[in-house]
Amino acid sequence: MIVVNTETLPGMRIVQVKGIVQGNTVRAKHLGRDIAAGFKNLVGGELHGYTELLTEARREAMERMLAQAQQLQANAVLNVRFSTSSVTQGAAEIYAYGTAVWVEPEAPAVPPPPRF
């Protein structure tokens, strides 16, 4: 499955648009990560626990989006985007979406015949 955040694929032509596909997940913080984040806020720096949480959530949302694209018999998803929103205190939704399509390689350009 080809996955890009562009509207087109160089060297490929869109044969059929299958439709919009999406995947999402809602993740909540847990006490261990909150305690570690609280200490990190005192000294500054990356909150590794939250980074891992969001990375896992993006992966899961992407997998669900690709599963939907496979059900539609697509071989590519174009214009992929991610969105994040707060669902409730301590929980966030990660949403991935794009356009499922069937693409094929463009026919090679045929050079014009020689002119005499």
Image: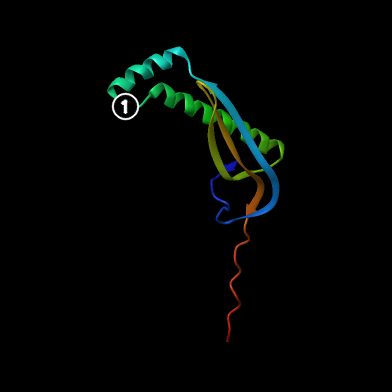
Three-letter code, disc 1: Gly
Q: Quadrant of the N terminus?
A: top right
The residue lying toward the viewer, choosing from 7 and 91, is 91
The residue lying toward the viewer, choosing from 3 and 104, is 3
Q: How many marks?
A: 1
The residue lying toward the viewer, choosing from 73 and 68, is 68
Q: Quadrant of the C terminus?
A: bottom right
Q: Which residue is mark 1?
A: 45
Position of residue 17 measured from the top left corner of the image (x, y, whole percent)? 69, 49
Position of residue 98 measured from the top left corner of the image (x, y, whole percent)? 61, 42
In the picture, residue 43 is in which quadrant? top left
Q: Residue at x 71, y 39 (%)?
A: 72
Q: Residue at x 64, y 52 (%)?
A: 104
Q: Is residue 33 above or below residue 56?
A: above
Quick one: which residue is furthest to the left in this view? Answer: 43
In the picture, residue 106 is in which quadrant? bottom right
Q: Is residue 91 above or below residue 112?
A: above
Q: Is residue 39 above or below residue 110?
A: above
